[in-house]
């Protein structure tokens, strides 16, 4: 579901919002060290990308998906290295949006969502899913 929304959204963000993209993405506050801060920071990034697409339907569809993912998994066991990887991927996506590289942004987002998918599968099979 995220790929169906976020891949076209990031391409549109690169196409429509390159000049504003870096400013909006840079406005996301610095990550806090605890899980709730990391998770909020993560959702803020993805919400900003979707907002840059300037497509209200993407925003509408993404909100409940993020809500489900937020409550479904216990991320407390994820270490700082994981969140550093996520931040690096976010920065790369932001740079590609800023440079108006639609194809690059889409592929970077695809790779990022695969990283996240592997994490969710691991959390689900390893007992990291909340009851």
Image: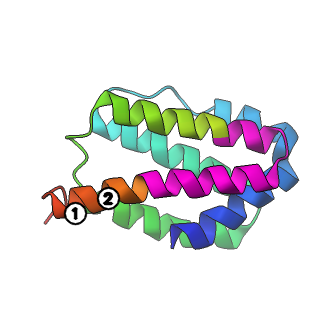
Residue at 18% from the left image edge and 63% from the top image edge: 125
Instruction: Mark 1: give few (<14), some (14-19) or many (20+) Cα within 10 Å.
Output: some
Q: Which residues are magenta?
A: 93-115
x, y percent for residue 46: 56, 51
Q: CA distance from mark 1 to mark 2?
A: 6 Å
Residue positioned 56% across, 39% down in the render: 89
Quick one: SS at disc 1? helix
Q: Is residue 57 above or below residue 27?
A: below
- Residue occupying image coordinates x 32% and y 58%: 120
Q: Position of residue 73 (x, y in %)?
A: 25, 57
The residue shown at (21%, 41%) is 76
Q: Quadrant of the C terminus?
A: bottom left
- The answer to which of 1 and 118 lies nearer the viewer is 118
Give above or below for 116 relative to 57: above
Judging from the image, what secondary structure is the residue with disc 2 in? helix
Q: What residue would you read off at disc 2?
A: 120
| Residue 75 in the image, given as x and y percentages of width and height | 25, 46
| Residue 24 in the image: above or below residue 118 | above
Answer left or right for 23 relative to 66. right
Note whether residue 60 is visible.
no
Expressed as whole percent of the image width and height from the top left, the position of residue 108 reads 63, 49
Q: Main secondary structure of the magenta part?
A: helix
Q: Verify CB contact (< 8 Å) between mark 1 and mark 2.
A: yes
Tell me if I can see residue 22 in this picture: yes
Closer to the camera in the image, 14 or 50: 14
Residue 47 in the image: above or below residue 78: below
Residue corresponding to mark 1: 124
Going by the image, does 100 lie left or right of 126? right
Q: Quadrant of residue 65?
A: bottom left
Rate crowding at label 2 as few (under 14), some (14 to 19) or many (20 or more) other CA atoms within 10 Å: some
Q: Quadrant of residue 10?
A: bottom right
């Amino acid at each position: 579901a995220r790929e169906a929304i976020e891949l076209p959204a990031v391409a549109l963000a690169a196409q429509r919002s390159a000049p504003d993209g870096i400013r909006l993405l840079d406005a996301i506050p610095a990550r806090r060290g605890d899980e709730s801060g990391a998770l909020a920071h993560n959702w803020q990034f993805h919400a900003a990308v979707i907002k840059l697409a300037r497509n209200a339907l993407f925003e509408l569809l993404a909100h409940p998906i993020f809500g489900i993912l937020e409550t479904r998994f216990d991320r407390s066991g994820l270490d700082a290295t994981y969140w550093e990887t996520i931040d690096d991927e976010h920065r790369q996506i932001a740079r590609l949006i800023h440079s108006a590289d639609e194809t690059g942004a889409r592929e970077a987002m695809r790779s990022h969502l695969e990283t996240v998918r592997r994490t969710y599968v691991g959390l689900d099979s390893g007992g990291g899913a909340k009851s």
